[in-house]
Image (cartoon, rainbow, N blue to C red):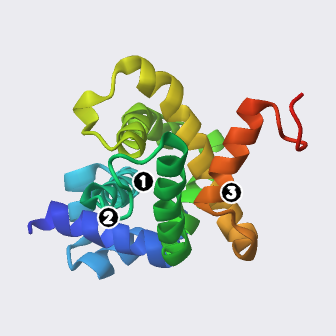
Amino acid sequence: MGHREDLLEGAKRCLLEKGYARTTARDIVAASGANLASIGYHYGSKDALMRQAIIASSEEWGTGVAQVPADGAAVPADAEPLDRFAAVWDLFLQRIATEREFIAAQVEVLGLLPRDAALREAIGEVLPEGGEGLVAIFEGVPDTEVDAEAARVVGPFYQALLTGLMVQSLLTPDRMPTGRDLADALRRVTAGEVLGKAE
């Protein structure tokens, strides 16, 4: 790897170990083996590098989740929609439970968005692609098969659930729902049976 890649890998490590806001340029240099001047040369600033690190980390995490359902073992291709919904959420919940440093970094960044326009813009640019990727994972299809309307409407729904579950995992990790709980909640809401009877 060259200095640019080394810096990005070092920034991603710092993101997990120290968090987004507490990482300094010197931390990144120590983690990457590059020199201080190379941050400015390759990325313009430490903040620009950290924005790239959070986006790259999120993309890698999403890719890792996407590869698991593809094997067909955990999520059969012929599963009923609510069964598939439950099974895929269980895969996400397993990752959330075992990758707490990544989740903490993601939630930290959410809190910074209102006061950091550049960070908000950088994440806003990739958010639609993330929603499209989530639709593809839940439908068990390549991203190329997700139409624009599904990405626009259903993508943010999955993103909202995922973000909420990440936050909840940090607050009450011992009271997390299962994929089946989420599927049952969706069924009850859409059937008008939230209180146990049709409304």
Measure the alpha-carbon separation of dots 2 and 3: 21 Å
Q: Inspect the image, locate mark 1, and give the three-letter code of the amino acid beneath it.
A: Asp
Residue indicated by mark 3: 181
Q: CA distance from mark 3 to mark 1?
A: 39 Å
Tell me where residue 191 sits by quadrant: top right
Picture residue at 41% right of the left edge, 37% below the top: 135
Q: Which mark is residue 72?
A: none
Q: Earlier in the sequence, mark 3 or mark 1?
A: 1
On the question of residue 164 being in view, the answer is no
Mark 2, residue position? 73
Residue type indicated by callout 2: Ala
Number of numbered markers: 3
117 or 185, nearer to the observer? 185
Residue that badge 1 annotates:
47
Residue at the extreme left: 1
Label 2 Cα crowd, 10 Å radius (few <14 / some 14-19 / many 20+): few
Q: Which amino acid type is marked by label 3?
A: Asp
- The spot of residue 1 in percent (x, y) is 9, 69
Q: Are marks 3 and 1 in contact (CB under 8 Å)?
A: no
Classify 142 as above or below 92.
above
Does residue 47 appear in this view? yes
Viewed as shown, does residue 175 lie left or right of 195? left
Quadrant where the C terminus sits is: top right
**Residue located 38% across and 63% down the image:** 74
Residue in the image at 31% along x and 80% along y: 31
